[in-house]
Amino acid sequence: MKINEARPYVVKNLPYALNPRSIAVVGASRYPSKVGNKVVYELQKWGYKGKIYPVNPRADQVLGLKAYHTLSDIPDEIDLVFVAVPAHLVNSIVHEAVKIKAKMLVIATSAFKEIGRGELQNDITEYCREHELPLIGPNLVGMGSPYMHFNCGFIPYLPVPGPIAMISQSGANLLAALGTSQEENLGMSFFVGLGNKADVDFSEFIEYAEADPHTNVLSIYIEGLDSPEAFVKSCKKCTKPIVVIKVGRSQIGVKAAFAHTASENPETDEYYDSIIKEAGAIRVTTWQEFLDVSLALGYQPTLKGDNVVMITNGGGAGLLSCDHFERLGMPLHELKDISPLLAARIRAYMPMFGSPLNPVDISGTASVIQYKGAFQQALRDPKVDGVLGAICPTAVTDVLGVAKAAIEVYESTKELGKPFLMICQGGAECAEAIKLLREHGIPAYKTAEQAVNAMVALRKAAKK
Amino acid sequence: MAKLYKVGTPEQQEYLHDYNFAPKGYAFFEPGIYGNDAKEFVAFNIAKSFYQVYPEVFNLAYIEKSTGIKSEEAKKRLKRLYDEKYMMLVKNSCVGVMGFGLYYWVVKLKKGTTPEQRKELTDWFQENDQICTGYMMEEGGDFDYYNGNHMRNLDNLIYGVLDKFRFREYVEYVHLTPVRRLIRESSVNQFDAKKDFRHYFFAKEAVKKAVALKKGMDEKDFALLEAINNAPSAAEMFDYDVLAKLSGLDATEMKKDLVHIVDETKTVIPMVYLDYRRLGIKQRFFLVSLFENTQSYRSEQIADELAEDPRFVNFFDFGDAHHNYMLSIYDELTDAEDIRQKLLGYAEVKEVKEALSPRQFRRWTARLDAENGLYEECVFTDDVLLDRSEEK
């Protein structure tokens, strides 16, 4: 339901959604195959330190914990009420949550507005607003934070800790991002599924993320933007970069967004584009781009100018990159134009058949020492705003050696505040290098276009 | 002369009218058939989820009118009956209509089966979510278990359930008893009873005997169960205003929906189940086999005659089986010898086997094993789209 701006009581209570002292799981089942059981199980498994109170009118015990028949039976203050019961039971639980003065209500349950029960969803939302009980959901997968060891929902794993706040209306995409986090070191500060977003809005999580010490970037997946004014206001207040993927652009996509999270998109896509621009957020188109850009913005400083130097041992990767830079409206400049002295110095790290143009091609025979020297020279040059490195695995390339050298250089030049991204296009050794680089905070990508998208986003973020 | 339902005559069609029951649909795709989470079920689902704490989901005004028990007292009594595990609100969906076959089976163990082996098999049956209803028999009877599944087809039953235990060394036999007509379960007439659909049978005499046992239920408690189960329609069974208040949904709509699927289409029976184990009594099961040359119509006529007897708690009529009926009575409340003589009084009856059951595993998917902390845990398994013959 629409709001005009982030509500202070909601923002104030949001910490209870991600770091509650006590949780009541309503619908906690004794059966491992059921969702309500998984919620309690995952809380326990991932080391949640607060108190868990399963609520189930039929059970006396769930996963070794005493179960309560109703919320009112719990002899403790409850910060967060997590609801995982069928839709027709929710109304009563909401009233009880208000009665026990819970701080935060999360409704995972589906079958509300998205299947035509808009009135019920609105009634529940209005009741929560009347009593200043923030409601997240309904129709969501859950939330959590690796820093808090908090996995609350039917979510199989936590992401690795990192700087990305992942705020998603889609549970499936949220889970996909968590999987990527595990597999490809996409570190997150917290994540939350908003589902139908009946009450708590993007804008309120934006304000929460702004204050969150672990968050460097906000990554937001939007199906419906029903409170654009609030979104713009909160984004403008936010000093951290914001990446947005807004779906429902196609005709059938508009319908699918309603069927999924009851999201309404009454305006044209151009309208939403302008809202996102006005908010100063970076809009991306594809899911991969969303993750790639989030990674760069999360781990790297913004790109203060457009003097980017690319250092590669493969001319092909260089060409793909410089074409893509130009496509995105940020063409590479020749090295001699950026820094004539650097062009001369960098010659020392390439054979005579290398090219100091930009991309700087240090050739397929480049050694770890040559890479390291070229990276250092480029990053140290005051005229250079950012560096993009690329490794192509020739028979003589020590891919992991180069990755380690890149990490060493990155660690020693961090204080310069320049972004440093890498491309590792190849087989298993490149996948390993990407993982290693990411572990050390260097966004590394499989393809040239991914890295260029990320670098351009870093420039856009600097202009915010 | 009684009808013979002669093949090729109009009487053949009359047979179909008299004994052809609900069409077997494919899950919920048949027009007019609803899934368990459809809006048509919502009133029951709300009551089922709340009666443990809010017994006022039952229609207390109607109960007071029909029993004289005041609302406050009825609430307290219903709460106690639930808390002490005497009763459970359950529903039986007409599995044939829902797209399943209803397959029961009788298990006989070999002589010399050890108590450990018996316990191991009992626990396996109790834990197996595929087995939606099951009865354990006392040692020494003519058979040892009588269990049932709703399943897509026989292959799924054989591969998915039976093959997983029937080759154990101590199992003497497993006899399949596919249910042709589900006539009565837990004292309530089911979908294939010739008449008195949804009627609850618990004779006054039986109530007196049960009360005399002093096992925690008195006349008023039995009257409550009878009032709920014999509510003239689903409209009287629940208090829809209470359901509306709890759920935020519309009372009139919910009532209309439940009346439609219970009273009009007769595809589901909501009822309050009485757990005889908790009451400390046993069910005596009679497995009846007719002579093989008994005509189909005669078998059904006998079933209809027996179904008139209110003393039977359960009554299953089988097709494609060695046996024809499984009936049961409460042993402590009914004269078993009289029942035996009644059954043997039919010249068509070849054999009657008997066994005493002190325990039921589940009531239509809802677990009854409070001792495992899983009382009323409901697991509705659905294998309509599965080919379980691939299971190893």
Image (cartoon, rainbow, N blue to C red):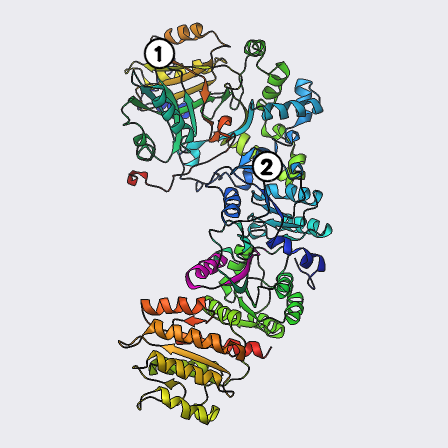
Secondary structure of the residue carrying numbered label 2: helix
Q: Quadrant of the C terminus of chain B?
A: top left
* B197 with respect to B327 (left or right): right
- Whether marks 2 and 1 lie on the same chain: yes
Give the letter of the chain under mark 1: B
Disc marking residue B46: 2
Question: Residue A152: x percent and y percent?
Answer: 54, 50
Residue tagged 1: B352
Q: Horizontal and vertical percent for residue A39?
A: 52, 46
Q: Residue drawn at (32%, 81%), measured in percent from left and top?
A: A366
Residue B123 versus residue A268: which sits nearer the camera? B123
In-front residue for pair B2/A403: A403
Q: Amino acid at mark 2?
A: Ile
**Of A177 and B2, the residue lying toward us:** A177
Where A27 falls versus A427 (above or below)?
A: above
Badge 2: residue crowd in 10 Å (few <14, some 14–19, many ≥20)? many
On the image, the x and y values in percent for residue B281 come to 50, 14
User: Which quadrant, please, contains the N terminus of chain B?
Assistant: top left
